[in-house]
Image (spheres, rainbow, N blue to C red):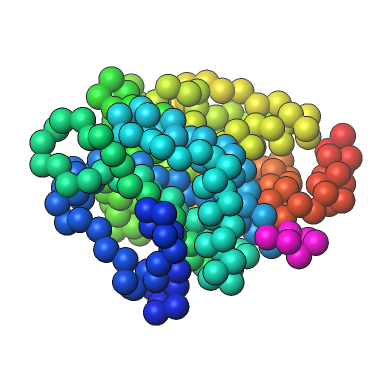
Amino acid sequence: MATYYNDHTVMFLNGEYVKASEAKMDFYSQSLHYGYSVFEGIRSYKTVTGETRIFKAKEHFDRLKASAEALNLPYTWNTVELTEITYEVLRRNNLQNAYIRPVVYAPANMSFNLNTESYILIEVWEMAAFLGDKLLRVMCSSFQRPNPKGFKIHAKAAGHYVNSILASQEAKAKGYDEALLSDMHGFIAEGPGANFFYEKNGKLYTPSLGNILPGITRATVLELCSELKIDVTEKEILPEEVYGADAAFFCGTAAEVIGFASLDDKPFALPWENTISKTIQDAYKNLITENKIALIEEVVGVE
């Protein structure tokens, strides 16, 4: 099993910096029993100048607030203070390249009544790219994303990820690296923890919003496409459209940008190194480490 902390690890818990090994929560929490909590996955990086920088801190903490409000969880913190606290947690753990997990969770409550308070924790640990750095063998999952009329799909809610776990476990049990889920209409939605793009004839395509989590990395890829003058279309996508395409990739904070080797054992038409998807992958790496010179060279190279 992975080890996320040791006797020296420090986390932020409800206003205090405490040792992770000594932290406690209420086992009657509504979050433990019903999956009623929200969280964020954030990364920090050592930049080319040697500084520690949390990537898109404002966007992530703003989304944490929006997720909590969508689920009626009381939210009393602000983005500036949480960003400052997170830098302090990183400092106390002597980490630069880190994964950051803030969680807003509920008190003891076995009813379905509204709570009058929420609690917060912020943990950090070292983590490589969530899906590794090799091209992925992906399968279309038998699991679908939840009906948006049954959930607040735009919220990053803990309970939603049971669906992700089941889909990912199914894929790995069948010998694949990861799953690709559809929506309730059979259109491609996203991966268990990442958004999806595919490439064909020099253009990128990605599922429209509505049945997917509007990922912050997804938004960053769209921004990079604009800067690199890469045409990208948001649309409903059937799996058959992806078979035989030039390339495909997942993107997410934990996964970063990672390409596919195949989908349902069908390989892609172009070598990954010769795709605009690889250009996006490189541009993203330069962006998160603030390698502005290399990023400019990417833009000039595409133009």
In the figure, 134 relative to 218: above or below? below
Please say whether residue 51 is one of the residues in the magenta stretch. yes
In the figure, 232 relative to 39: above or below? above
| Residue situated furthest bottom in the rendering | 7
Q: In this view, does 254 lie to the left or right of 22?
A: right
Out of 285 and 78, give the one closest to the viewer.
78
| Residue situated furthest front in the rendering | 15
| Residue situated furthest left in the rendering | 111
Residue drawn at (68%, 51%) of the image: 288
Chief secondary structure of the magenta portion? loop
Out of 139 and 283, give the one closest to the viewer.
283
Q: Is residue 299 left or right of residue 209?
A: right
Residue 251 seen by the camera: no
Residue drawn at (44%, 27%) of the image: 238
Give the quarter of the image for residue 164.
top left
Percent position of residue 276, x then y:
71, 41
Residue drawn at (10%, 41%) of the image: 110
Out of 3 and 71, give the one closest to the viewer.
71
Out of 266 and 49, give the one closest to the viewer.
49
What span is in magenta?
A: 47-52
Q: In this view, does 146 lie to the left or right of 284?
A: left
